[in-house]
Image (cartoon, rainbow, N blue to C red):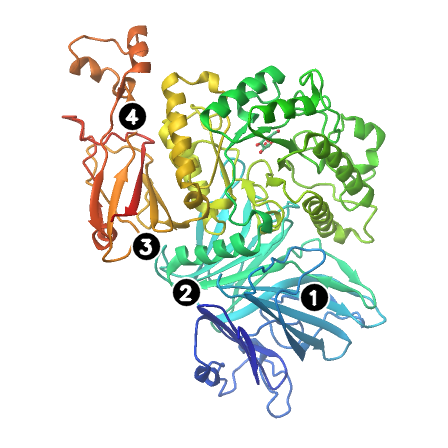
């Protein structure tokens, strides 16, 4: 029984959590509890004890038992204009032209499974794990109904919420703001964790203290954006990775989002999440309904790691397209950083052959295969294949790639149009723009109007032709500009533009998913500019960032991991120095970071030495043996991280993999230990590190002191020897109990500025090591 009504209480439960609210004498809903599992015997004492009057508050109703001050009552969803002065979750112009509404309990229904939406992703349940309750509120004056829809996902420890507004009055109403969820809790010692950033710096974690007033995390770019990811954590001050109380919220939506945390003067903290109300205006005529996107809520009393595990379980089991659930994702070679727009069939096949030799499984041709697309100034919107580059067309290329034993995938940017394109010449009205204004360009391109069904049909038809001809295994669905000049002739009010666009996008993605269920869709928006649960409902993985520098990637991937599991993070190894930072990093570290997620390569192998090629082959073999763990394991972050060092751990089926990354080498560094998480106390474990061979040049001129022959590190002979002569790096190979490893295993000493020997760990700047920990029999 995951959802119960025990008059007047509603009790929603997951494996470890309870969520409770009740009907008040005024028929408003009081929020009582969201957190660790509680007992039924607790229910009678969970309410707010308003035992005396307070100054300065409005009584809802003067009659006996109804003189409840809504401003002092933690509510489950509020209205506006009846005495609750905290931030309102909705703003509706009612049939009488006022903004006053008063939604109170009307009825409820408990159903098995999910109450799915036809237009918006809501998650799914193949495991009979879910129950849903629809609590219908009715306005006290008008026949206007508000459904609060809650679904409990038992194993995931997640509850989802959304709201549906229905107008049964003759007069239209106008929605200006409608949140997917709201609830109030006690507290004035909370902080807010958000992921903020920009191009090539996605997912940077920030923690902001919540004080009086409203704290907002939102986007008005038209997409979820890397400026502010829609995921938000509300944490008790002092919460860390493994301890402390925190609540997590994320919206299954890819457009303008909004999360507000509002601290009021009586110690009540209000949380709400939904579509950004800015520039939103949606009229609801008689018998029409409006559905909000769904919010995903969870709670942890064991810090952020546990909160992330709940979110990750939910995404892996109830969110990503079901045909990819638990399916190992292929290792990709992507043509972008290797060639950009400058390729032909011969170059692509050379790359593919080498990739195949190394063990790579999927070849992805990125941007540049169509129309006049020899740079980013033209061609978007067109789908004719560039036969100058691909003399046997895409069909010819695809079959040659397949003959090599690789799968074939292709890049598209379906939502866009370049003013320099055949499509624009024919159909300028397909582009989003406003008559009388010069439309602003982003990467030389305009948005296609997905509110227009003809545009959606055009995209679907053109893509289908290519997919059918080339029998694609994979699609990279890209989106490279924010929205401006918002207007569509296909919406009755321009305040409907952003959301209708999203519905249009989900409509095409839904069609594509249905027609081609086997195609692996990886979504992308200039990297992680649309990294959200909406996109994950259609494509199970996302290109995390255009930044492939592993040191930048450490914080980007760590940031994303607060809300999104490793199976969703697409990570590529590229050449160094990195194009985004000009930083030089070791090949081992590039792999050691990219391996935590879905691995790929994005480089031209011809620039690598034989030693590096051999190393990549070893890396790929290692990845394949642990792929299930690296994509679907439980991911742990560490409190011990510092500006100089970071660690990741992933665990599954009694195998644990720890990545230890040295961001900068310190002179004469501290002795170090690694603390492995999630082991069994009395079990014995073998801990092994990889032998990460080094080339001679790691030591530069120091080598001339160590060798009998004096070599100049700047001369050709040294460089030549360097290419072939490899040195072993110190490794660890020990057996210890779970207890001892969780307490901390003391690593061999790092190089401390003198007396090197073969038992010295050489890490250096950007060095890293991988430890594999298995039960030892
Ligand atoms: C975006 C993507 C890249 C690449 C280019 C192609 O920037 O994030 O990965 O696909 O577009 O133009």
- Tell me if residue 534 comes above or below residue 43 in the rendering: above
Q: How far, Cα to Cα, is label 4 from label 3?
A: 30 Å
Between 253 and 572, the one lying in front of the other is: 572
Mark 2 surroundings: few (<14), some (14-19) or many (≥20) residues within 10 A: some
Viewer-side residue, 718 vs 665: 718
Circle 3 sits in a helix, a strand or a loop, which is it? loop
**Local crowd size for mark 1, using a 10 Å CA cut-off: few (<14), some (14–19), many (≥20):** some
Residue 262 placed where, x, y %? 53, 64
* Distance of label 1 from label 4 (alpha carbons): 60 Å
Q: Could you tell me if the residues under marks 1 and 4 are in contact, i.e. CB atoms within 8 Å?
A: no
Q: Which mark is residue 702?
A: none
Compared with residue 590, is residue 189 higher up or lower down, i.e. above or below?
A: below
Q: Are marks 2 and 3 in contact (CB under 8 Å)?
A: no
Residue hosting label 1: 164
Q: Secondary structure at mark 1?
A: strand
Q: Quadrant of residue 8?
A: bottom right
Q: Calculate the distance from the C-alpha at mark 2 to the C-alpha at mark 3.
A: 30 Å
534 shown above or below 747: below
Relative placement, left or right, of 508 versus 539 is right
Nearer the observer, disc 2 or disc 1? 1
The picture places residue 775, in percent across and down from the top left corner, at 28, 49
* Category of crowding for the residue at label 3, using alpha-carbon neighbours closer than 10 angstroms: few (below 14), some (14–19), many (at least 20): some
Between discs 1 and 4, the one toward the N terminus: 1
- Spatial CA distance of label 3 from label 1 is 42 Å
Image quadrant of ligand 1 equals top right
Please say if the residues under marks 2 and 1 sit with CB atoms less than 8 Å apart.
Answer: no
The numbered mark, 3 or 1, whose residue comes first in the sequence reads 1
**What residue is disc 2 on?**
189
Instruction: Give the residue pinned by disc 4.
Output: 693
Residue at image mark 3 = 678
Image quadrant in which you'd find residue 627: top left
Using the image as rendered, state which of residue 341 and residue 408 is in the foreground. 408
């Amino acid at each position: 029984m995951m959802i119960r009504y025990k008059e007047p209480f509603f009790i929603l439960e997951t494996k470890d959590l309870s969520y409770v609210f009740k009907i008040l004498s005024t028929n408003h809903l009081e929020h009582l509890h969201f957190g660790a599992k509680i007992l039924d015997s607790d229910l009678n004492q969970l309410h707010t004890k308003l035992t005396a009057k307070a100054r300065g508050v409005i009584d809802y109703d003067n009659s006996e038992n109804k003189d409840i001050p809504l401003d002092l009552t933690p509510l489950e969803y509020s209205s506006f204009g009846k005495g609750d002065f905290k931030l309102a979750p909705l703003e509706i112009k009612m049939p009488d032209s006022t903004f006053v509404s008063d939604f109170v309990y009307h009825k409820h229904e408990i159903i098995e499974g999910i109450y799915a939406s036809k237009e918006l992703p809501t998650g799914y349940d193949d495991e009979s794990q879910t129950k849903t309750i629809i609590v219908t509120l009715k306005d006290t004056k008008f026949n206007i109904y508000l459904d609060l829809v809650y679904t409990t996902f038992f194993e995931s420890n997640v509850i989802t919420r959304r709201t549906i507004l229905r107008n049964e009055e003759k007069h239209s109403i106008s929605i200006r703001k409608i949140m997917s969820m709201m609830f109030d809790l006690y507290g004035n010692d909370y902080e807010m964790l958000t992921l903020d950033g920009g191009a090539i710096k996605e997912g940077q974690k920030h923690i902001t203290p919540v004080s009086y007033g409203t704290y907002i995390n939102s986007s008005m770019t038209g997409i979820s954006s890397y400026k502010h990811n829609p995921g938000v954590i509300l944490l008790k001050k002092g919460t860390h990775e493994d301890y402390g109380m925190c609540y997590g919220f994320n919206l299954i939506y890819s457009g303008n989002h909004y999360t507000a945390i509002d601290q009021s003067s009586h110690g009540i903290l209000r949380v709400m999440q939904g579509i950004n109300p800015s520039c939103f205006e949606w009229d609801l005529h008689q018998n029409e309904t409006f559905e909000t996107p769904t919010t995903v809520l969870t709670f942890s009393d064991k810090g952020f790691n546990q909160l992330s595990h709940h979110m990750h379980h939910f995404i892996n089991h109830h969110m990503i397209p079901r045909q990819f659930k638990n399916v190992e994702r292929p290792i990709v070679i992507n043509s972008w950083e290797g060639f950009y727009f400058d390729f032909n069939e011969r170059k692509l096949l050379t790359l593919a052959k080498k990739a195949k030799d190394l063990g790579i499984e999927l070849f992805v041709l990125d941007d540049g295969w169509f129309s006049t697309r020899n740079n980013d100034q033209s061609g978007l919107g067109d789908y004719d294949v560039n036969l100058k580059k691909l003399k046997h067309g895409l069909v010819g290329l695809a079959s040659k790639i397949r003959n090599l034993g690789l799968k074939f995938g292709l890049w598209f940017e379906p939502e866009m149009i370049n003013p320099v394109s055949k499509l624009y010449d024919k159909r300028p009205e397909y582009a989003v723009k406003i008559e009388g204004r010069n439309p602003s360009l982003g990467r030389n391109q305009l948005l296609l109007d997905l509110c227009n069904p003809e545009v959606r049909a055009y995209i679907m038809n053109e893509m289908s032709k290519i997919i059918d001809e080339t029998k694609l295994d994979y699609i990279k669905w890209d989106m490279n500009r924010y929205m401006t000049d918002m207007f569509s002739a296909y919406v009755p009010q321009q305040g409907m533009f952003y959301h209708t666009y999203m519905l249009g996008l989900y409509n095409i993605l839904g069609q594509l998913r249905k027609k081609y269920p086997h195609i692996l869709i990886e979504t992308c928006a200039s990297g992680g500019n649309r990294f959200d649960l909406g996109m994950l409902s259609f494509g199970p993985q996302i290109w995390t960032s255009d930044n492939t520098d592993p040191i930048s990637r450490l914080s980007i991937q760590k940031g994303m991991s607060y809300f999104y599991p490793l199976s969703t993070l697409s990570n590529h190894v590229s050449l160094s120095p990195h194009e985004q930072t000009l930083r030089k990093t070791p090949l081992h570290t590039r792999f050691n970071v990219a391996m935590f997620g879905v691995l790929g390569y994005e480089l031209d192998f011809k620039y690598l030495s034989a030693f590096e090629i051999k190393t990549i082959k070893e890396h790929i073999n290692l990845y394949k043996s642990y792929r299930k763990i690296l994509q679907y394991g439980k991911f742990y972050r560490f409190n011990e991280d510092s500006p100089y060092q970071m660690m990741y751990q992933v665990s599954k089926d009694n195998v644990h993999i720890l990545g230890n990354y040295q961001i900068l080498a310190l002179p004469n560094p501290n002795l170090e230990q690694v603390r492995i998480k999630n082991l069994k106390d009395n079990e014995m474990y073998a801990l092994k590190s990889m032998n990460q061979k080094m080339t001679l040049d790691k030591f530069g001129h120091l080598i001339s002191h160590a060798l009998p022959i004096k070599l100049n590190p700047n001369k050709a002979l040294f460089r030549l020897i360097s290419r072939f002569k490899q040195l072993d790096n110190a490794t660890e190979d020990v057996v210890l109990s779970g207890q001892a490893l969780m307490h901390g295993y003391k690593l061999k000493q790092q190089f401390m500025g003198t007396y090197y020997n073969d038992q010295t760990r050489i890490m250096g700047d950007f060095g890293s090591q991988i430890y594999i920990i298995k039960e030892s029999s």
